[in-house]
Image (tube, rainbow, N blue to C red):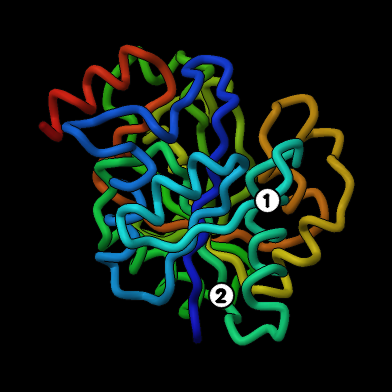
Amino acid sequence: MNPILLIPARMASTRLPGKPLADIGGVPMIVRVWARAAAAGLGPVVVAAGEPQVVAAVERAGGRAVLTEPGLPSGSDRIWAALMAIDPQGHHDVVVNLQGDLPALDPAELRLVVDLLHESGADIATLAAPIDNEADRINPAVVKAVAAWNADETRGRALYFTRATAPTGEGTLWHHVGLYAYRRAALERFVSLPPSPLELREKLEQLRALEAGMSIAIARVDAPPLSVDTPQDLARARSLLQ
């Protein structure tokens, strides 16, 4: 396997405008994410940027970035556009999609998701963490992964993703971590598909893959990484990382 790690980033965040360049301890957030990805030691790391100022920030830090069309509809479309620009020959057969708002991500989780893709034979691999509080259980912003788990709940097969509290009854609820490893052919197929009915209802892109019959393997991590989506999240990230 020959992975490449791609980080989609654009300035037009509705809840936190200019998010990629948000300062965290004197370092733009996108640069912190790039550095965490590079620390995984899996392969080249490239930021798929929607604006020239994001490219400039990454390059000033010694990283690599490629400018993509600002109006692309999703992060998956953005990483595919970047991949076509930098690796049209198809040397990289595994593509890791790392969101640009995870400045404290453990690099070991990137290695885990790539290992999972290899060992499972699935089209896509992702992660989930147990939910341990009521606020997250009922929060529609916390996406729940419904999976068929093995006996010790360390590996599983994703069945559904939802913003609702699901499944009902006793047992663990799982917080989906929005980090993916794709086989290159699976990503190519995924971005060629139109948005699916359940994807549009739930506003969850990964449901397109499930509705198309693609397989998603899932592995357990102990806790979800801090995701910076709001000014409050940014304040927590600054407190944690400064």
Foreground: 157 or 36? Answer: 36
- Tag 2 near tag 1, CB within 8 Å: no
Task: Name the residue at 33% across, 37% down.
Answer: 29
Q: Position of residue 241 (x, y in %)?
A: 14, 35
Marks 2 and 1, how far apart at CA = 20 Å
Asked if 197 appears above or below 68 in the picture, the reply is above
Q: Position of residue 23 (x, y in %)?
A: 28, 29
Asked if 157 appears above or below 89 in the picture, the reply is above
Q: Position of residue 24 (x, y in %)?
A: 23, 31
Disc 1 packing (10 Å; few <14; some 14–19; many ≥20): many
Q: Position of residue 169 (x, y in %)?
A: 47, 25
Disc 2 packing (10 Å; few <14; some 14–19; many ≥20): many
Task: Name the residue at 30% across, 41% down.
Answer: 103
Q: What's the mark number on residue 94?
A: 2
Q: Is residue 77 visible?
A: yes
Q: Identify residue for label 1.
A: 68
